[in-house]
Each structure stands twice: as C-alpha cells, then as structure tokens.
Image (spheres, grey):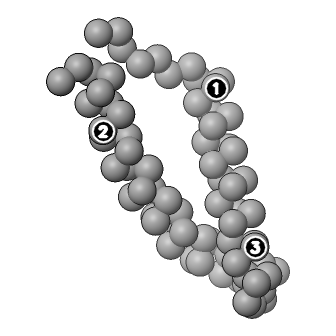
Amino acid sequence: MSKNKEIDRVAEYLHEVMLENLKDSVGWAIQGTDLDNCEGDEYYDMTNAVMTRTIEYMLNWLETDAIQIPEE
C-alpha cells in the first residue's frame, strides 16, 4: 500500500476518534463558564460553535507550521 493511501486510511479513522474526543472535551471545558448554563438547542449550537472554532485553530496551526506529506 502506498504511503499516501496508508496516511488516508489512518487519518480517516482518526478523524472519527478525534471528533468524538472533541465532543466529550467540550463538556468539561465549559464547566464553570457562562456557556455551562446553556440548555437544549442552545447547548447543541454552542457545542458545535466551540468544536468549529477549535478545528479552525487546529487548521490555522497546520497552515502556519506547513506539515508536509512525504512523497512516495
């Protein structure tokens, strides 16, 4: 299997794991903040907003650090 295909296979699995971890982490990360008072749809929307912003920070980090995928 080529390196790029193997990278894709591992990354596909990890994205599912990382999203689940991120969802779990939002709950404890907001404890003691104003966001902790949200309920129902507001809680769902806030959770998605926190997750989206976190992913944006991660993408920005990738862009600035320019991680390269090795050539085959």
23 left or right, relative to 15: right
Label 3 sits on a secondary structure element that is helix
19 left or right, relative to 37: left
Kindly identify which numbered label has been placed on residue 45.
Answer: 3
Question: The disc labelled 1 sits on which kind of residue?
Answer: Glu
In terms of sequence position, does the residue under pointer 2 or pointer 3 come before the other? 2
Question: The disc labelled 2 sits on which kind of residue?
Answer: Arg
Q: Residue at x 73, y 89 (%)?
A: 40
Characterize the local packing of mark 1: few (<14), some (14-19) or many (20 or more) Cα atoms within 10 angstroms: few
Question: The disc labelled 3 sits on which kind of residue?
Answer: Asp
In terms of sequence position, does the residue under pointer 3 or pointer 1 come before the other? 3
Which of the 4 image quadrants contains residue 49?
Answer: bottom right
In terms of sequence position, does the residue under pointer 2 or pointer 1 come before the other? 2
Q: Is residue 57 above or below residue 34?
A: above
Residue under label 1, please give it.
63
Residue under label 2, please give it.
9
Give how far across and how far down residue 17 sits, in percent. 39, 58
Characterize the local packing of mark 3: few (<14), some (14-19) or many (20 or more) Cα atoms within 10 angstroms: few
Determine the CA span between mark 2 and mark 1: 22 Å
Q: Is residue 5 above or below residue 23?
A: above
- Camera-side mark, 2 or 1: 2
